[in-house]
Image (cartoon, rainbow, N blue to C red):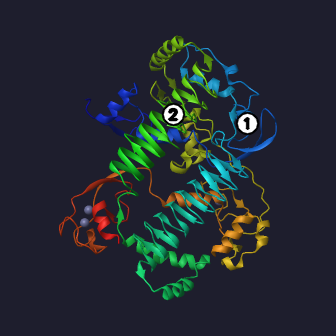
Amino acid sequence: MTSAETKTCQNCKAPFTIEPDDFSFYEKMAVPAPTFCPQCRMQRRMVFRNERALFKRNCDLCHKPFIGAYRGGTRFPIYCPTCWWGDGWDSRSYAAEYDASRPFLAQWKDLQSRVPRPSMNNYTGATLLNSDYTNCSGELKNCYLIFGCLRDEDCLYSHYLNDSRDCIDVLYGARNEHCYECSDIENCFELSHAQSCLGCRTSAYLFDCRNCSDCIGCVGLRNKQYHILNSAYSKEDYERKKAELKLDTRSGQSSFVKAYQALRDAFPRKYYHGQMNHDFSGDYVANVENTHEVFYTKNARGCKFMFWCTNARDVYDYMSWGDMELSYECISSGANSYRSLFAETSWGENKEVEYSGLCFNSSFLFGCIGLRNKQYCILNRQYSEEEYHALRKTIIEDMKKLPYKDKQGISYPYGEFFPIELSPFPYNDTVAQEYFPMSPAQAAERGFAWGEAERRDYAITMAADAVPDAAADIQDAAVNEVIQCAHDGRCEDQCVTAFKLVPHEIQFYKKYGIPLPTLCHNCRHAVRVAMRNPLKLWNRACQCAGKASEREIYANSATHFHGEGKCPNVFRTSYAPDRPEIVYCEQCYQAEVA
Ligand SMILES: [Zn+2]
Ligand SMILES: [Zn+2]
Ligand SMILES: [Zn+2]
Ligand SMILES: [Zn+2]
């Protein structure tokens, strides 16, 4: 077995370590070890996915207008979903012959500049009923401005939310109903302003609670009812106190949030979010085994460097959706794919699809774009099985000798994912802007495309500071207002500067006593993303000192396995060492939650 090796990232110049297990994986995939560090690799993949930025333009085939993920003036044609998935064009007509005198990825870029792309990245063949303003989604009914979502009904302004009904402003969750302004929740009902909760009902402002109902402002509770700020009340006292808090007004909410935040700061945090994991490192993970450095990952074995993936086995470096095996350096390329390498947006029964984009139900493709149900193609050109394997081998050798070089002189030999400058999207329209934000000047310095803020001449009828404070004052006529976003485009969060309300949300706010929002849906999403931990891990030790936390900020309520001495446990955690939270290991944390 090869021993661990420390390398310098070509991109950020930081050192990174390749472990013996990683070398075994690269050997199994027949790829060289990476020359970019894990963080730079994740950023690079994310630039190939625009989830949230939507634009109006016309289809380049049928010329009808539609809402899609591309701005006007792209270097490739854009077709509406009906035309792209229809039979009115043939992607093989763009076939190119390989030219050994030029870097392969430069030829791929030429192909990319000619082949039409579908306006949206919605799941193949899945119905979207009355849900036009969505992307990266499938099987929706009456949904609006939701992204990366599957099988939802009546959901608005949500992201990575599956199998849910009547939810507004939820980030990452499954099987929820009537929830509002939450992140990382499952099996919840009428829950608002909650994070990392399972099976909670009719509650608000909860953090890491399970199977609780009628609780407000609680942290780390299990199977509790009628609690406020972790204290128990009788049903009558709970109802009286709840009314006094006036959580149906923004002013009542902002004063209560201070007390809730103080409780959160004083209570220990488990070193990661999730449950049922073995031999793992990461955050927001469930049911993974022998899986490391992963975020938002569920049901994974033998995986590493993942972000937002479910059901994967032996996969390294992946983002978005799942159901895949033995794949490396791909984005949006799951749904029963096997041995996908350096693929973007290529899913559904794919096998050995490599350096390709927008390829579906295909096998043995190299450097192709927009193919469906094809085999043995290179740069969209058809070959025989033998010709394919021989030419693929030649190209791989050529890519090592004559790699593509980006504007900054960074080279991309065989084994590296596509350079950021080959993304079909401007940097700030992609997922990368959410997790690796850049200013226009920083992007320009790196030579990345940037989408200028659109001129939005909204005639604002309600200034942000004129939005009523109380849910009781919401009028049905609010549907006609153009409300100014309180950020007014001054942030870097894809702010749309103003927003309108849809009838369903007005009824929802009135029914559940929720005051109107003062930020646009993109700014609200950015606030939720910022409330979660970063996609990065540090080595730390448990901060339990025996009877209390280190520096005695929190007094333990139970006796721990390590007695009165300091806990010996160490871990990888997304809580950076300079953060204020008290971070406990699993055992110490479990002893404290009740
Ligand atoms: Zn790096
Ligand atoms: Zn905004
Ligand atoms: Zn501990
Ligand atoms: Zn302890």
Q: Secondary structure at mark 2?
A: strand
Residue that mark 1 sits on: 73
Vertical relation: 440 (above or below) 267: above
Q: Evaluate whether residue 80 shows in this view.
A: no
Q: Is 577 on the left-hand or right-hand side of 394? A: left
User: Quick one: label 2 or label 1, which is nearer the N terminus?
Assistant: 1
Apparent side of residue 444 relative to residue 508 in the rendered image (left or right): left
Q: To which residue does mark 2 refer?
A: 337
Few, some or many C-alpha atoms within 10 Å of disc 2 (few <14, some 14-19, many ≥20)? Answer: many
The percent coordinates of residue 457 (x first, y second) are 78, 56
Amino acid at circle 1: Gly
Q: Identify the secondary structure beneath mark 1.
A: loop
Q: Amino acid at mark 2?
A: Ser
Does 572 sit left or right of 519 as displayed? Answer: left
298 lies above or below 325: below
Quadrant observed for ligand 4 in the rendered image: bottom left
| Residue 484 image point, x, y percent | 71, 64
Residue 544, quarter of picture: bottom left
387 is higher (above) or lower (below) than 141: above
Left or right of residue 439, residue 552 in this image:
left
Q: Is residue 50 above or below residue 477?
A: above
Q: Nearer the viewer, mark 2 or mark 1?
A: 2
Q: Residue at x 66, y 40 (%)?
A: 125
